Image (cartoon, coloured by chain):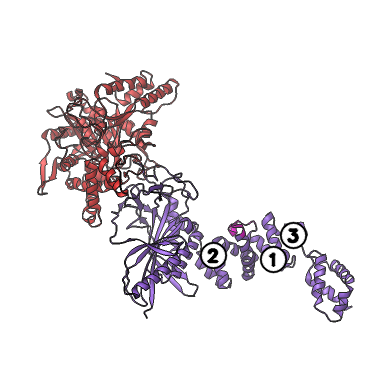
């Protein structure tokens, strides 16, 4: 086993015991990146068919020099007997939606392609302060607006390590692909409707969306501010717990970051799950979507392989002592995407206002008559199709004459979705669940080009993940096998507010239950 | 000929005098600072930043809300007001829209003519300021220093009926803001900003006509002049048979004319929605009580009390409640002095006010404290020093910071009450002025003042003049 393949928790122990140096770990990882990643994403490049189609292309910016300095500092500290942080020497990547001091922080958009952040996002800063070694910034859908990474302005966009003709999922596609391909043990992603969990499922890694407010959003270039959650992507539950431990907690720069103390996730990981109540809802085993012509709601079942894999996962948890509770009603699940379409667009349109060519980022090089023309040209030239669509939609549904029938209505739907969860997690209620188990995605990773272009259909890739964002609840996606094409399948566990520890425990129990399964041995082909 | 009345409403923005800005820790006051020196990623709207509310802003706004007799809301929300402008770095202003900090409220204006006008306000809310744009030969220069400076916005009802009333509202509001210590309220420095909505109608009518909005007025005099000019213009237009269009006007102070900035055809849609980056303001009872415990007696209430409790003339009461420090000074002096507030008022209005103005500091910062002033008046009352010594003591105390008693002792300023000493000097004076003695004795009684003066002169002002006079009379009667 190469060093780049080791779990983060293992690397930290080895580095602390001086069995291996942080520099050795880093060099192994940089070699891996050099071998599998190919050319980094750039705005000048157009997607070419012949352009390294067998590479991952996870990175936009590789920060090898910075990483070497950080690794040397860790090694120096270890040698001098100094205390080192809980992630000492662990190579990690950051989704390029976070500002990190001194790095281009692009949001995968032309409009920020030339922006170098003068400050660091709180979770990124905490990872570095904990001894993490920053490998670089990884690709994503432009401004996180997508579920496949195909909308990135930085081409080539990432490819799925299990099958490079398939998408990584998104928007944290670069993060999931990097972790899956051994390009860093950990990655910092964001989840607004499933943007951590869906690519984690597509790429066969662990991805956790914490409770809204558990991890500070300071420095995260906002999409849907009331939905965005930074969180970990890792190759195993212990690493995800270790990373969450570091990034979680109150932040004086974020008023919406909770002041609750952070539990010791790692210490509680191996606790017994006996008696934990895990629910299964039929509403999470089908997809409801509107007919593009008539608007009528269609219902479709999931791919049987995904359904079977999720139910099999529930069975393994039952073997470990969890009580599985069937037939949990989640009646408002089907409204998750329409409500999200409205709420996230309103917030996105407003959040994109600041990109006006005045202060930073792209400004049109064309001669302009007046200020409005400068705005129009700058935004017209530098925003991709997704930001434009979201601005149009967001402006429309928040206009004074429409906001009642769209925006305010969507907020009420959101409350109902939250109520579904309140009912099932109520400790004095009928179901008293500790978690809800569901497939993470309706399908496995789809072929590149298949869905892209159909914004509505693309959005439905998030139907099973978005309710947790509406409700602000923690959820974790775990790999649970492969479909017949060899693509990873993921299932998720959604829990009550701030019950990350329980979800991680269940996840770890599932890992233990399946650690000798044959599918655990499979590695990505890349 | 129709008699018209003006219908005026004022929209005021008040800059709170907090140390730091509303959502970041940059210095709030940038007066005299070079452009773009008090800025950070947060107030410049860099990608990824978040606002964090400065609690002092809420506390200061709550004091104003209480003083304006509003209903303070236990929970209020921030909203985004979306629009594009280069000096608005986020492309939206964080403000409060449908759930403001306070609703309702009023300020009562005692007008110099003797009537009281009650001015209603609909709501009071908190928001952040935008930056400043300057046009510079075809370029726009932007200063972000002012971004995130805390503001309170208050809009009055259409309750003001003249330019004088509008000016009076601003005078009283400015007094109140300074009194509460929540704003410097300096219009020239834009701490207090005012836009005026003006319309006219035949006196006694109960409908409202289209109004114009006057912007960019930066002194109370300018507000009065601009409104008066606009009222006259509207009367002129209506008399000429023309309608009034809903224009936005700009006051050019130098030339004393209003310029049309734009016509207001449609209301802008700011697409307000709740600011997801901030929690609601929850004014829990304990916090509210803590804030309100520092709410002082308000100037108009104190003015009434001074009139009734201390029997002060309205004129005195007005001046002595014009400014809180002077007012507190007066009351402390009255308490120490123990009686006759009018006597204290006279000293204050004549001498202390002059000292305060000359030094440009509030009365409370004088070394000559209210207690020292009371002591000096008491020294005069009890004949230890005479009035002119008392007056000169004011400056001596202020300069040295020593107590009046100490100075009197050190400098031997006490009046000489020693009969023998005075008698000796009186004898001397009479002996040195045989001609005057002769004249006096022949009936020129007016010379007594001259004799007393001579005695005072010899005794360097310390003699008790009453005693000196009595002795002189006795000697001259011989």
Marks 1 and 3 on same chain: yes
> Label 2's element?
loop
For the record, the magenta segment spans B358-367
Alpha-carbon span between mark 1 and mark 3: 13 Å
Residue occupying image coordinates x 42% and y 42%: B40
Marks 2 and 1 on same chain: yes
Location of the N terminus of chain B (image quadrant):
bottom left
Specify whether residue B360 is painted magenta: yes
| A29 sits to left or right of A447 | right
Residue B251: percent from the left, percent from the top?
A: 41, 62
> Label 3's element?
helix
Q: Is residue A67 above or below residue B137?
A: above
* Residue in front for this viewpoint, A317 or B322: B322
Q: How many marks?
A: 3
Q: Quadrant of residue A246?
A: top left
> Label 1's element?
helix
Disc nearer the start of the sequence (1/3): 1
Of tags 2 and 1, the one toward the viewer is: 2
Residue B393: percent from the left, percent from the top?
A: 70, 61
Q: Which mark is residue B408?
A: 3
Q: Which mark is residue B378?
A: 1
* Residue in front for this viewpoint, B450 or A261: B450
Residue at mark 2? B322
**Chain of the residue under the numbered disc 2 shown in the image:** B
């Amino acid at each position: 086993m190469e060093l780049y393949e080791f779990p983060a928790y293992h690397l930290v122990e080895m580095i602390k015991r001086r069995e291996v140096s942080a520099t050795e770990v880093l060099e192994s990882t940089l070699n891996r990146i050099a071998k599998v990643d190919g050319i980094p994403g750039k705005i000048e490049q157009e997607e070419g068919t012949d352009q390294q189609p067998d590479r991952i292309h996870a990175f936009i910016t590789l920060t090898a020099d910075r990483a070497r300095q950080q690794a040397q500092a860790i090694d120096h500290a270890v040698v001098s007997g100094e205390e080192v942080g809980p992630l000492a020497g662990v190579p990690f990547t950051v989704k390029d939606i976070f500002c990190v001091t001194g790095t281009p922080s692009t949001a995968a958009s032309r409009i920020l392609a030339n922006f170098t952040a003068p400050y660091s996002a709180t979770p990124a800063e905490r990872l570095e302060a904990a001894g993490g070694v920053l490998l670089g910034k990884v690709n994503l859908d432009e401004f996180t607006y997508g579920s496949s990474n195909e909308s990135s302005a930085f081409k080539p966009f990432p490819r799925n390590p299990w099958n490079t003709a398939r998408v990584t999922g998104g928007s944290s596609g670069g993060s999931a692909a990097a972790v899956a391909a051994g390009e860093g043990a950990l990655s910092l992603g964001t989840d607004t409707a499933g943007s951590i969990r869906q690519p984690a499922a597509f790429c066969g890694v662990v991805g956790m969306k914490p409770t809204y407010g558990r991890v500070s959003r300071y420095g995260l270039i906002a999409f849907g501010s009331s939905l965005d959650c930074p969180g970990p992507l890792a190759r195993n539950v212990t690493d995800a717990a270790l990373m969450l431990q570091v990034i979680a907690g109150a932040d004086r720069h974020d008023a919406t970051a909770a002041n609750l103390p952070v539990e010791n996730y790692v210490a509680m990981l191996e606790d017994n799950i006996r008696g934990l109540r895990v629910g299964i809802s039929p509403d999470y085993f089908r997809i409801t979507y509107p007919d593009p012509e008539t608007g009528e709601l269609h219902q479709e079942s999931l791919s049987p392989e995904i359904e079977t894999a999720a139910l099999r996962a529930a069975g393994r948890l039952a073997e470990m002592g969890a009580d599985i509770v069937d037939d949990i009603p989640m009646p408002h699940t089907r409204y998750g995407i329409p409500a999200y379409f409205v709420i996230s667009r309103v917030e996105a349109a407003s959040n994109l206002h600041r990109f006006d060519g005045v202060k930073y980022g792209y400004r049109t090089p064309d001669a302009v008559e007046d200020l409005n023309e400068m705005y129009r040209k700058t935004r017209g030239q530098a925003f991709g199709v997704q930001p434009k669509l979201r601005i149009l939609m967001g402006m429309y549904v928040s206009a004074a004459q429409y906001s009642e029938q769209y925006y305010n209505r969507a907020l009420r739907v959101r409350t109902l979705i939250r109520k579904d969860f309140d009912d099932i997690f109520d400790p004095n209620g009928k179901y008293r669940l500790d978690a809800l188990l569901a497939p993470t995605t309706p399908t496995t990773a789809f072929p590149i080009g298949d869905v892209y272009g159909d914004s509505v259909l693309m959005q439905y890739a998030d139907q099973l993940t978005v309710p947790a964002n509406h409700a602000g609840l923690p959820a974790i996606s775990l790999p649970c096998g492969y479909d017949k094409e060899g693509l990873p399948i993921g299932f998720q566990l959604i829990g009550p507010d701030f019950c990350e520890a329980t979800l991680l425990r269940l996840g770890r129990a599932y890992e233990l239950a399946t650690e000798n399964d044959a599918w655990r041995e499979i590695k990505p082909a890349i | 000929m129709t008699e018209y009345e003006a219908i005026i409403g004022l929209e005021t923005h008040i800059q709170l005098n907090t140390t730091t800005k509303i959502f970041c820790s940059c210095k709030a006051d940038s007066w005299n600072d070079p452009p773009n020196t008090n800025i950070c990623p947060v107030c410049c709207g860099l990608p990824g930043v978040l606002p964090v509310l400065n609690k002092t802003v809420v506390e200061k706004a709550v004091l104003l809300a209480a003083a304006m007799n509003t209903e303070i809301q236990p929970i209020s929300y921030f909203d985004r007001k979306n629009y594009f402008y280069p000096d608005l770095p986020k492309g939206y202003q964080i403000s409060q829209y449908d759930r403001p900090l306070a609703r309702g409220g009023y300020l009562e204006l005692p007008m110099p003519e003797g009537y009281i006008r009650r001015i209603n306000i609909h709501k009071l809310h908190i928001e952040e300021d935008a930056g400043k744009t300057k046009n510079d030969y075809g370029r726009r220069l932007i200063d972000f220093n002012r971004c995130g400076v805390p503001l309170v916005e208050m809009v009055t009802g259409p309750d003001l009926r003249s330019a004088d009333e509008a000016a009076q509202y601003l005078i009283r509001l400015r007094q109140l803001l300074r009194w509460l210590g929540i704003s410097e309220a300096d219009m020239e420095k834009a701490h207090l900003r005012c836009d005026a909505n003006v319309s006219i109608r035949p006196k006694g009518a109960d409908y409202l006509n289209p109004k114009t909005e006057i912007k960019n007025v930066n002194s109370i005099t300018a507000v009065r002049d601009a409104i008066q000019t606009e009222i006259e213009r509207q009367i002129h237009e209506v008399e000429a048979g023309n309608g009034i269009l809903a224009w936005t006007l700009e006051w050019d102070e130098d030339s004393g004319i209003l310029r049309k900035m734009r016509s207001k055809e449609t209301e802008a849609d700011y697409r307000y929605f709740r600011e997801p980056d901030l929690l609601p303001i929850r004014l829990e009872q304990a916090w509210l009580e803590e804030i309100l415990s520092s709410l002082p007696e308000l100037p108009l209430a104190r003015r009434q009390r001074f009139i009734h409790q201390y029997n002060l003339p309205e004129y005195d009461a007005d001046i002595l409640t014009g400014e809180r420090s002077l007012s507190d000074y007066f009351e402390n002096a009255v308490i120490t002095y123990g009686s006759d507030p009018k006597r204290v008022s006279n000293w204050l209005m004549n001498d202390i006010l002059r000292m305060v103005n000359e030094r440009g500091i509030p009365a409370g910062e004088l070394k000559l404290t209210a207690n020292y002033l009371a002591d000096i008046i008491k020294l005069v009352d009890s004949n230890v020093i005479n009035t002119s010594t008392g007056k000169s003591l004011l400056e001596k105390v202020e300069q040295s910071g020593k107590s009046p008693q100490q100075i009197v002792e050190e400098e031997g300023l006490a009046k000489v009450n020693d009969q023998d000493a005075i008698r000796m000097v009186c004898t001397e004076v009479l002996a040195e002025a045989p001609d005057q003695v002769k004249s006096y004795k022949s009936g020129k009684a007016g010379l007594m003042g001259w004799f007393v003066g001579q005695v005072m002169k010899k005794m360097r002002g310390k003699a008790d003049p009453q005693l000196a006079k009595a002795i002189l009379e006795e000697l001259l009667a011989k």
